Amino acid sequence: MLQDLAFGHLDNHYEDHAPKKGDIVLCMQGNGIMVARDRLDALTLPLYEQVQEWCGDWTHWDDQPFRYIFTLQEVRYFLWMGQAGQPGDSAFAYEPAATLRQVVSKTVCFAAMTGWHLFCWYRDSRFCGRCGTATVHDSKERMMRCPECGNMIFPRINPAMIIALTDGDRIMLSKYAGRNYTRYGLLAGFQEIGETCEECVAREVMEEVGLKVKNIRYYKSQPWGIAGNVSIGYFCDLEGDDKVTLDETELSSAEWFCRDSIPAEDDGISLTREMIRIFREGNEPT
């Protein structure tokens, strides 16, 4: 999956670092992330010294235009907190954050998606939701604090269930309604307040396809920073009737597929595709 890197790990402990030459800087604008592509379609992120040349005067949210976010494979990453505008190097351009999903540059994609998650949180946490006062960054941890009422705002992570509903040698695959993403996937949905993950699995299946489930078992989780989520994978078995009652506001289709006729391959990126492959191979948890 996307976070399964060839070496090293993500050290996301917050430190009040200042950037230096050789550090990587993530620049965001609108819904885009600044990247460069070479002839082989491999992705590159800009360095601190490059962004320094491009940024000029800045409009930023506090007195620290470069915000340290994490260290990945012994390389430090920062967010540019202002508007970088158009890069001075023509090799770089802003690409939609949601499209940066590829195995050839897995480390870059993972860093960009995780950085995007933090960028959106910083952007949306500039003011206190309790009293409206401008927030300030805490000096010891990743938290925005309200100097007026003391409200503490931590990064928001949305739990989303990824659900492999199976019936013997069949698995249910679905397609979203009204989205640009038209590939087959698994049933999925966000956890509601006051419910367990297992209760969410059963509720989402009933809401989306009108079916009952049993034997709900956890598989694996995945950070999915591009949407600010943590995806939590579960397998479950059909209980009773297999007739689908489709929620057409959420899904355009939901169909049963046998192991040998599944129209989806593992992309090496998403939890959804890995779970589909695990089922195809007959290795799903029991």
Image: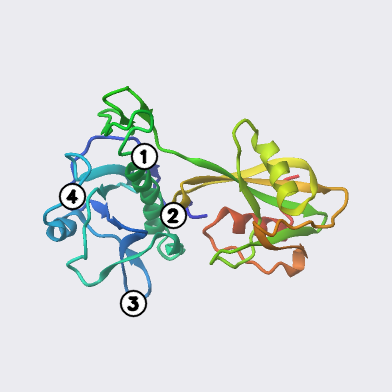
Question: Relative to residue 97, is residue 49 drawn left or right?
Answer: left
- Mark 1 in CB contact with mark 2 (< 8 angstroms): no
Q: Which residue is drawn at 33% across and 58% down?
A: 30
SS class, disc 2: loop
CA separation in Å, label 2 and label 4: 37 Å
Q: Which amino acid does label 2 sit on?
A: Ala
Which label sits in the foreground, 2 or 3?
Answer: 3
Q: Residue 254 carries which label?
A: none
Give the mark, 2 or 3, whose residue is nearer the N terminus.
2
Give the mark, 1 or 2, whose residue is nearer the N terminus.
2
CA separation in Å, label 4 and label 3: 34 Å
Q: Residue at x 67, y 56 (%)?
A: 278
Local packing at callout 1 (Cα closer than 10 Å; few below 14, some 14-19, many 20+) is few
- Mark 2 in CB contact with mark 4 (< 8 angstroms): no
Q: What residue type is labelled 4?
A: Thr
Q: Mark 2 points at which residue?
A: 6
Which label sits in the foreground, 2 or 4?
Answer: 4
Which label sits in the foreground, 4 or 3?
Answer: 4
Q: Where is residue 237 in the image (x, y as percent from the top left)?
A: 79, 48
Q: What residue type is labelled 3?
A: Arg
Q: Mark 1 points at which residue?
A: 12
Give the mark, 4 or 3, whose residue is nearer the N terminus.
3
Quadrant location of residue 51? bottom left
Local packing at callout 2 (Cα closer than 10 Å; few below 14, some 14-19, many 20+) is few
Q: Mark 3 points at which residue?
A: 39
Local packing at callout 4 (Cα closer than 10 Å; few below 14, some 14-19, many 20+) is few
CA separation in Å, label 2 and label 3: 23 Å
Q: Position of residue 27 (x, y in %)?
A: 27, 56
Give the mark, 1 or 3, whose residue is nearer the N terminus.
1
